[in-house]
Image (tube, rainbow, N blue to C red):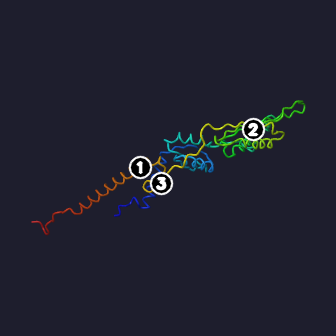
Amino acid sequence: MNISWRFSPIWRVLLLGLMVLMLEACSVDLYTNLEEREANEMVATLLSNGIAASRVVQKDGKLTVTVDEDQFSQAVAVLNTAGLPKEKFATLGTVFKQEGLVASPVQERAQMIYALSEELSRTVSEIDGVLSARVHVVLPDNDPLQRNAIPASASVFIRHEADLDVNPLIPRIKTLVANSISGLTYEKVSAVPVASQRTSEPAPGAELTSFLGIWMLPASVAKAKLIFGCLAGALLAAMVSLGYLAWRKQSKRRKIYPLQPYGPAK
């Protein structure tokens, strides 16, 4: 019998599968109902910071990001620093989705302002280095009898990475907002950039550690050793039990029984 099973590819696959199953039992959900792109970005960010993370596909096709229970708070802090998950913004289609009776002019106006703010906030948030953004729009009342009409205006709040030079972006963002709203001029758009207080520099990639030919993060080595110890103990106990049963069976076969005399008893 070949006793070098620990180096066999089959045993490595089985061991890896058992480790994954047992490690998953120690994991907790970090974020749920994620799109594939967002989940990939979050997992990549966590892995680059030395935090073991994985994706789990839900029944509805969405994804869940899971991490080790003892690294939950650290994972939340890392994702908050990276501005993940990104804020969800409503679209024009969802804002103006008709439900029930016809909307009043006041309601339609409020919906239009909200929809414009959401669309512009989402666009500005897509800029590299911008962690979050909010655009607040003020539109004049459509009152033809009003003499001194208040012109349209907008304010842009930008929370960006600390190492991002946002000054060259301000004029371009103001131009984007001004050209997106009818009657809004460049001079009536104000921008307030705020640098994130937490560092946004990515941590160096965590070095992987090999354990029994399986590469894993250093944070998972201790659990892997514990799992391997339990598996090795269970395997040893099973081998001892099988050996004992084989010994008993062999002993019964070798047991000598006295011969009975042949012929009629006297």
At which x and y percent is residue 81?
60, 41
Looking at the rendered structure, the kind of residue marked 2 is Tyr
At which x and y percent is residue 18?
45, 53
- The answer to whether 48 appears left or right of 104 in the picture is left
Q: Nearer the viewer, mark 2 or mark 3?
A: 3
Closer to the camera in the image, 176 or 35: 176
Q: Nearer the viewer, mark 2 or mark 1?
A: 1
At which x and y percent is residue 10?
44, 61
Residue situated furthest left in the rendering: 266
Q: Nearer the viewer, mark 3 or mark 1?
A: 3
Separation (CA) of disc 2 from disc 1? 54 Å
Q: In terms of image quadrants, where is residue 91?
A: top right
Q: Which residue sits at x=72%, y=36%? A: 192
- The answer to whether 171 appears left or right of 224 in the picture is right
Looking at the rendered structure, the kind of residue marked 1 is Lys
Separation (CA) of disc 2 from disc 3? 50 Å
Looking at the rendered structure, the kind of residue marked 3 is Trp
Closer to the camera in the image, 119 or 59: 119
Closer to the camera in the image, 41 or 229: 41
Instruction: Examine the rendered structure and indicate whether residue 115 appears above or below residue 229.
Output: above
Closer to the camera in the image, 251 or 38: 38
Q: Which residue position holds label 2?
A: 114
Q: Which residue position holds label 1?
A: 225
Separation (CA) of disc 3 from disc 1? 13 Å
Q: Which residue sits at x=69%, y=43%? A: 125
Which quadrant: the C terminus? bottom left
Residue situated furthest bottom in the rendering: 263
Q: Which residue position holds label 3?
A: 215
Q: Is residue 106 visible?
A: yes
Instruction: Examine the rendered structure and indicate whether residue 8 appears above or below residue 80.
Output: below
- The answer to whether 191 appears left or right of 261 in the picture is right
